[in-house]
Image: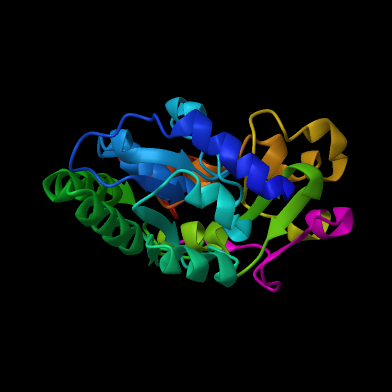
Amino acid sequence: MRMSVLVALCAACLWLSIPVQAGQPRIVSADGSITETVYALGAEDSLVGVDTTSNYPPEVRSQPRVGYLRALPFEGVLALRPDVLLTTVEAAPDRTLERLKQAGVEVIQLPVARSPEGAMARIREVGRVLGKGPEAETMVADIRKRVERIDTNTEGTPAQVLFLMAAGNHGVMIAGQDTAASALLDALGADNAMGDISGYKPAGREALLASRPDAIVVAESRPGQFDINQWPQLAALDAWKQGRYYIGDSMLLLGFGPRLPQAMEAVAGVLAKAGPVASAAH
């Protein structure tokens, strides 16, 4: 018997007793922002498993894990007997998703949110799947209100922001265009200081010096991961020396989930120090 099957059988023995209220679908959530939305809507009792990107709120750490959303194991997911796999279009491999459908699991792949409107639309859809439509509408109304209070005054030259990702074994990466980081800056009316590259690229020390940003944002995949002492070129930039930087959780900053207003407010506060481009209204 293959090791993956043995792991699946062990998972089944451990987790088939997870209490799910009668009438609720058994849901595996494979996306950190979707999992966060499930909790924010008060529907966590429906969860029987999550993927490794699901780390917020802290209570989610007690959930069984089914692997990374881009490498979902068929046996590991099926062992939890889900009615629904709730994920995004980034989920993979396709073979696993097709086999789950053939096994009777409803696979729901939501769009990746890259704007406040996209984030709110995804929350509505999660609410529909969970039977939490009214709660989702209340959440969306609150998000919209908070986002609209953020001053994204774009008069004059937009602030140039250097956005970095401290990504564990991958080191520190520069966020270019076509990333969630750049989408967050777009929502705030700021410009990506590294807009001439696409995706995430290793941070070259010369490139950091040449960027000369008005502000710096660092997204950490886990708290305390970024150490400025290892990046003297970054510390030498005026933006860093003058305190125009923000270091925060990557899921908060890049997830476009229920905490999107908090992420926008945090970055807007740094931009306010750089000039009148964007500031958090109080």
Q: Nearer the viewer, residue 162 or 197?
A: 197
Q: Nearer the viewer, residue 166 or 24?
A: 24
Q: Is residue 178 visible?
A: no
Q: Is residue 133 left or right of residue 54?
A: left
Q: Nearer the viewer, residue 193 or 238?
A: 193
Picture coordinates of residue 89 (x, y %)?
Answer: 47, 68
Picture coordinates of residue 6 (x, y %)?
Answer: 66, 42
Q: Is residue 236 left or right of residue 194?
A: right
Picture coordinates of residue 36 (x, y %)?
Answer: 39, 41
Considering only vertical position in the picture, is 180 above or below 255?
below
Span colored in magenta: 188-208
Identify the residue at image location x=41%, y=39%.
Answer: 48
Identify the residue at image location x=65%, y=40%.
Answer: 7
Q: Is residue 201 magenta?
A: yes
Q: Is residue 215 left or right of residue 36?
A: right
Q: Quadrant of residue 228?
A: top right
Considering only vertical position in the picture, is 65 above or below 206?
above
Q: How many marks?
A: 0
Q: Is residue 230 visible?
A: yes
Q: Is residue 172 left or right of residue 11?
A: right
Picture coordinates of residue 138 (x, y %)?
Answer: 15, 44
